[in-house]
Image (tube, rainbow, N blue to C red):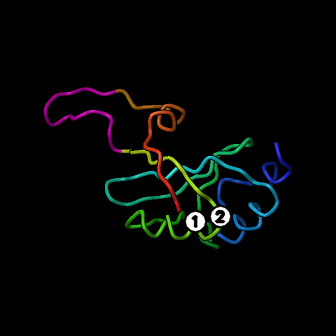
Amino acid sequence: MTSIDMTLGDHITLKQLSQALRNGFSPIVEVESMDGIYKVRFHHANGVSDLSNAEGHVSTFLGTGEIRDTLGALGLTHGVLTFADQCGDEMIGVEGKAMTPDEMLAYGTRISFR
């Protein structure tokens, strides 16, 4: 675990992320789709940090292109696209069991930022 992992909280700004990456931070990047809106999470040795603005509000995106450009410019090369809204379908009676965060990362779609 790098020392930067120990100082990260639940939220990280782009500025903090850029500095952390320069200091050896190497997270697993998750891009979570929430019915057409996306948010970014960074999984690291000390937990999970949501990409947020300076006020601590989670940053949301309307497409993956902006995420690709933003994270690629910082040097990140890839991540995992997960889907928060695919558990079952109550409209047709298909029950579902919510996936765990580890399952979402394991079975998510690999994506590139470059």
Query: In which quadrant is the N terminus drawn?
Result: top right
Residue 75: mark: 2
Question: x, y (%) of residue 110?
Answer: 47, 45
Q: Residue at x 77, y 67 (%)?
A: 19
Query: Quick check: 103 left or right of 50?
Result: left
Q: Position of residue 74 (x, y in %)?
A: 65, 68
Give the number of the disc on residue 89: none
Q: Which residues are magenta?
A: 85-96
Relative vertical location of residue 93 with respect to residue 55 in this rendering, above or below: above
Residue 83 in picture, x, y percent from top left: 39, 45
Residue at the outermost front position:
114
Residue 72 image label: 1
Report the amino acid beneath label 1: Gly
Q: Secondary structure at mark 2?
A: loop
In the rendered view, would you say 31 is above or below 72?
Answer: above
Determine the residue positioned at 57% across, 65% down. Answer: 72
- Describe residue 8's horizontal placement relative to residue 108 as left or right: right
Q: Residues within 10 Å of mark 1 (few under 14, many from 20)?
A: some
Task: Please report the residue visible at 74 percent of the width from the left and 60 percent of the height from the top.
Answer: 21
> In the depicted view, which residue is nearer to us: 46 or 55?
46
Name the residue nearer the viewer: 103 or 52: 103
Q: Residues within 10 Å of mark 2 (few under 14, many from 20)?
A: few
